[in-house]
Image: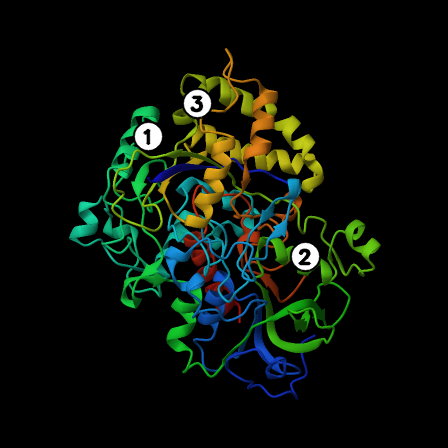
């Protein structure tokens, strides 16, 4: 008997938390290796820290120039032949294994992340090699809001919908649905997609795509409950809808996952003699040529991921690019002396650059799951869900929308005050919250993601059903007021977990708001240290992150090329 569940992501943002010597040879080793000696004491034009989605993408674009040498240092192994990585139907089998970072959070919970070449995370692609593969983009207005948080002089750099959409499409190799997929609900709008990029995007393999009654019924139910419209394609900057969505798989490769390594590295692995990837090693510190501002990175110190005490050094001729993700990028900056002296000094770390908001402004998408036992119908398919709904404020709160909107704006000051320690200041956070509130109340930005799944993945279903037997779907706070605030607070704290979409910890904002990087993605008061990953996103978007991050990385590569 099939077990079904509905997942809901809350998208309301939660704030918390001199160059190397030219005497060294220009050419270094290439390919992929686990030997530290391939990079030790070698010089590269660019050193990329982290071989996840963004790191692999930006490295690949820089290495297109055969005169440029690129080193990528990745903590995980090269697991491209591991079915837990390439088989989309094996999603979930990596939890709690050597492929999972499992960063601890509160209440004994974790944020999972893929410790492998290509990275990965829970339910969606924060990195690329282990995820739920959903390919969705946020709303136009959410991306446009990024520019409003930058200095006025940086507004024309193009950190908005118009400036990012073309780069999202540049990365994409979209395959329209065939007749079988179309008969099961797949639709698309041709101008919303790119067709010549490296990342395969299409709908599930025809025999695997669900053909049972559950997904049409889900669409009808969501429409009936909320009034939300069904769109043919939500990837044109209009996610406030319910839609059958594509996933990142490569139908040319037996329907395997279209991860960043498979898309950007595997096709050129044997021909790019200027690109070295060192796996099973982790950068422990960025080295600087001087301690006076602005800082100039000379290279990096790295060690085996097995925590061997031996340290190695690689030199950067041009830039060090940090792409370690929203959890580990700020940690590495702090270990390198960039951060809040109040945090660094007690740890014995010399503060080279006082940048207090490194690691702050953390925003995540919390998730809860409600499960039920089905009535025995044939789901006629397998694998990831094909249908996602992104309702806005009015579609969630109905008759209480105006009251809820008024309460949001009335609460911004108190919310900012309560979370001020997780930002630059109360005033800075209030400005950011005002932008977010405007998007939610006035621009119809979705406030939740709701999707329906059927017996996939087995590992997660087992966990979810176990919880749902203890806390069935109707056991939410309820009384004549539909539940008190305190009851809902307790229920949320007990039932919500991290989706593993952390952003914002090295935010691209003006410094007066707590920004860590500028519109060129350079860390403030450095000459050649950039950040290219989810930590630069100043706010959440109503989407899974992979499409956005491919666009960020593609744009970053062009910014870097243009600056040389």
**Residue 302 in the image, given as x and y percentages of width and height:** 67, 72
Say which label, 2 or 1, has the lower sequence index.
Answer: 1
| Measured Cα–Cα span from mark 2 to mark 1 | 41 Å
User: Quick one: which residue is furthest to the left in this view?
Assistant: 179
Is 269 on the left-hand or right-hand side of 98? left
> Circle 1: is it few (<14), some (14-19), or many (20+) Cα within 10 Å?
many
Q: Earlier in the sequence, mark 3 or mark 1?
A: 1
Circle 3 sits on which residue?
Answer: 397
CA–CA distance between discs 3 and 2? Answer: 39 Å
Of residues 31 and 539, the one drawn nearer to the viewer in this rendering: 31
- Where is mark 1, residue-wise? 222
Of residues 109 and 358, the one drawn nearer to the viewer in this rendering: 109
- Left or right for 229, reference 141: left
Is there any visible trace of residue 562 in the rendered image?
no
Residue 109, relative to residue 169: is it above or below? above
Q: CA distance from mark 3 to mark 1?
A: 14 Å
Q: Is the Cβ of the residue at disc 3 closer than 8 Å to that at disc 2?
A: no
Q: Residue at the location (55% across, 34% down)?
A: 495
Residue picked out by circle 2: 331
- Disc marking residue 391: none
Give the crowd class for mark 2: few <14, some 14-19, many >=20 residues within 10 Å: some
């Amino acid at each position: 008997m099939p077990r079904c569940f509905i997942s809901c992501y809350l998208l309301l943002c939660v704030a918390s938390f001199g160059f190397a010597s030219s005497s060294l040879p220009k050419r270094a080793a290439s390919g992929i290796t686990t030997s530290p000696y391939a990079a030790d004491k070698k010089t590269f034009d660019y050193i990329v820290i982290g071989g996840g989605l963004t790191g692999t993408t930006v490295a690949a674009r820089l290495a297109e120039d055969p005169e440029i040498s690129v080193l990528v240092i990745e903590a995980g192994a090269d697991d491209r032949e591991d079915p837990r990585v390439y088989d989309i139907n094996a999603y979930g089998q990596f939890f709690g294994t050597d492929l999972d970072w499992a960063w601890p959070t509160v209440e004994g919970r974790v944020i999972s992340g893929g410790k492998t070449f290509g990275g990965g995370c829970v339910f969606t692609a924060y990195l690329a090699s282990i995820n739920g593969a959903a390919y969705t983009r946020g709303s136009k207005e959410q991306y446009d809001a990024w520019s409003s948080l930058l200095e006025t002089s940086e507004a024309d750099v193009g950190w908005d919908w118009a400036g990012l959409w073309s780069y999202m499409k540049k990365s994409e190799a979209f395959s329209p649905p065939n007749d079988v997929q179309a008969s099961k609900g797949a639709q698309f709008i041709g101008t919303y997609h790119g067709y010549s990029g490296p990342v395969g995007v299409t709908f599930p393999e025809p025999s695997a795509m669900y053909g049972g009654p559950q997904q049409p019924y889900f669409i009808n139910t969501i429409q009936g409950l909320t009034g939300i419209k069904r769109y043919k394609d939500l990837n044109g900057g209009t996610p406030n809808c319910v839609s059958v969505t594509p996933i990142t798989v490569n139908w040319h490769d037996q329907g395997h996952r279209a991860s960043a390594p498979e898309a950007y590295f595997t096709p050129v692995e044997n021909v790019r003699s200027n690109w070295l990837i060192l796996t099973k090693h982790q950068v422990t510190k960025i080295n600087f040529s001087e301690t006076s501002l602005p800082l100039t990175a000379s290279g990096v110190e790295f060690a085996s991921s097995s925590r061997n005490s031996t340290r190695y050094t690689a030199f950067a001729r041009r830039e060090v690019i940090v792409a370690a993700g929203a959890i580990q990028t700020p940690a590495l900056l702090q270990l390198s002396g960039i951060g809040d002296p109040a945090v660094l000094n007690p740890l014995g770390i010399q503060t080279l650059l006082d940048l207090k908001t490194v690691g702050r402004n953390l925003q995540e998408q919390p998730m809860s799951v409600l499960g039920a036992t089905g009535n025995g119908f044939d789901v006629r398919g397998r694998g990831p869900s094909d249908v996602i709904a992104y309702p806005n404020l009015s579609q969630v709160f109905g008759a209480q929308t105006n009251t809820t909107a008024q309460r949001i704006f009335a609460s911004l000051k108190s919310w900012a005050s309560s979370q001020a320690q997780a930002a630059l200041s109360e005033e800075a956070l209030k400005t950011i919250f005002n932008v977010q509130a405007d998007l939610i109340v006035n621009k119809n930005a979705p406030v939740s993601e709701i999707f329906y799944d059927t017996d996939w993945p087995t590992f997660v279903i087992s966990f979810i059903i176990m919880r749902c037997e203890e806390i069935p779907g109707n056991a939410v706070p309820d009384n004549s007021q539909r539940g008190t605030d305190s009851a809902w607070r307790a229920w949320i704290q007990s039932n919500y977990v991290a989706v593993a979409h952390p952003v914002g910890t090295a935010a691209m904002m003006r410094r007066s708001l707590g920004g860590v990087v500028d519109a060129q993605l350079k860390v403030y008061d450095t000459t050649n240290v950039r950040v290219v990953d989810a930590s630069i996103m100043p706010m959440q978007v109503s989407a899974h992150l992979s499409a956005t991050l491919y666009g960020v990385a593609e744009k970053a590569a062009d910014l870097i090329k243009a600056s040389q």
